[in-house]
Amino acid sequence: MSDAYMPGFGNDFETESLPNALPQGQNSPQKCNYGLYAEQLSGSPFTAPRGTNERSWLYRIRPSVRHTSRFSVHEHEHWKTGPHICDDVMPIGQLRWDPLPMPNEKTSFIEGVRTMTTAGDVHTQVGMATHAYVCNTPMVDDYFFNSDAELLVVPQTGTLEIFTEMGKITVEPTEICIIPRGMIFQASPVDGEARGYICENYGAKFTLPDRGPIGANCLANPRDFKTPVAAWEDKETTCRVHVKWCGRFYVTEIGHSPLDVIAWHGNYAPYKYDLKTFSPVGAILFDHPDPSIFTVLTAPSGEAGTANIDFVIFPPRWMVAEHTFRPPWYHRNIMSEFMGLVHGQYDAKEEGFVPGGMSLHNMMLPHGPDTMGFEKASNVDLGPTKLDETLAFMFETRFPQHVTAYAMGLETLQDDYIDCWKGLKKRFNGTIEGNWD
Ligand SMILES: [Fe+2]
């Protein structure tokens, strides 16, 4: 029952925490060893094509039907679900926030989820939500599963221990964790408090992007993804299982822990990934590719090349392009971009976008380097330089992102963000050189 992992992305794993707990040669023996119950957890329809067919077999102390009782409605004030369109909230404008403050009152990981934006529709399994989380207390006898989505957790400060049905994952800043749809878990801050970001994916699961001409290596390599070995607890106390289902919250009380899987095998499982192992590919002579070159994981929609969500990072890297404006260029985009910063500085915005902060550049709204960033990048000596000690990321979706009333009411919303472009001067004066005074 240790914090140990198996390498690989989407592998068919197998793990047992007691000898011979895992049946060999079949899934459903007449009687399982140790008196365990056999149970299948399906992450795809039974008939999904082989490449996207996902299921695991779990061998547990009690079957999952004993891990819920009667449900009652449970309110969660700050966790919203798409469609969630607030008529009285201004939906457009370039937006940026400073970090959420840590809570004063006791707040668990689930209680600390604060929805910033929603996109798409949970009822048709398209779209996503972006959240920030803040927490300062362990879940102890509280457990949670999300029927609506898989969760991509991006810690910004503080380590989380995430105890899932299928094993324990410790995830710290610069790492990410994926918790599949429907999986029971509890998450607790290891060092007293923690803050970070969550992308709640209502649609098809995250997978690795195709690399095209890049070939068989670089970007996120499959062996760097880590899936936990089986871990369990045999605890007989009053426990609460919280459920998110079509945007509403329910709770059910049981007399034991639902984390009772002794052994499992299959390819539907949680995993973590260290973003420091991402091998970036970029321009080695001039210009630079679109930011999609930094895609770690992509959640496809039904339309080729048009992601429900791309999870993109901006990691430390060398800048070597000659006669080139090196930061991200000015642009407008049909996709909608929510950004966060784990640590350091982002090269297009050296000030104002701080670790733990967030920004939103929604569908077709223009953005790009601030005035200072433009001036600097236009005049800098273009020797090889390393962007170091930085890690920004983006949750980018094909759907417009609707801002919550909570997000628009935050004191940390920067009223003056739009002013960062105010100083961009007219350089055109009819001469080829332009006016750079
Ligand atoms: Fe952008």
Image (cartoon, rainbow, N blue to C red):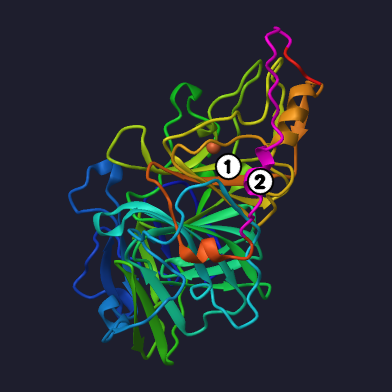
* Quadrant in which residue 182 is drawn: bottom left
Queried on whether the Cβ of the residue with tag 1 lies below 8 angstroms from ligand 1, the answer reads no
Against 250, is 116 above or below? Answer: above
Q: Which residue is mark 1?
A: 313
Quadrant containing ligand 1 reads top right
Give amino acid for label 1. Ile
Q: Residue at x 67, y 44 (%)?
A: 419
Percent position (x, y) of residue 99? Answer: 65, 61
Q: Which portion, as a residue range, is magenta? A: 413-433
On screen, residue 69 versus residue 294, left or right, reads: left
Residue at point 32%, 58% (across, down)? 83
Residue 418 visible to the viewer: yes
State the mark number for residue 391.
Answer: 2
Of 62 and 96, which appears nearest the observer? Answer: 96
Q: Quadrant of residue 16?
A: bottom left
Residue type, label 2: Leu
Q: Taking the image as drawn, is residue 132 in sight?
A: no
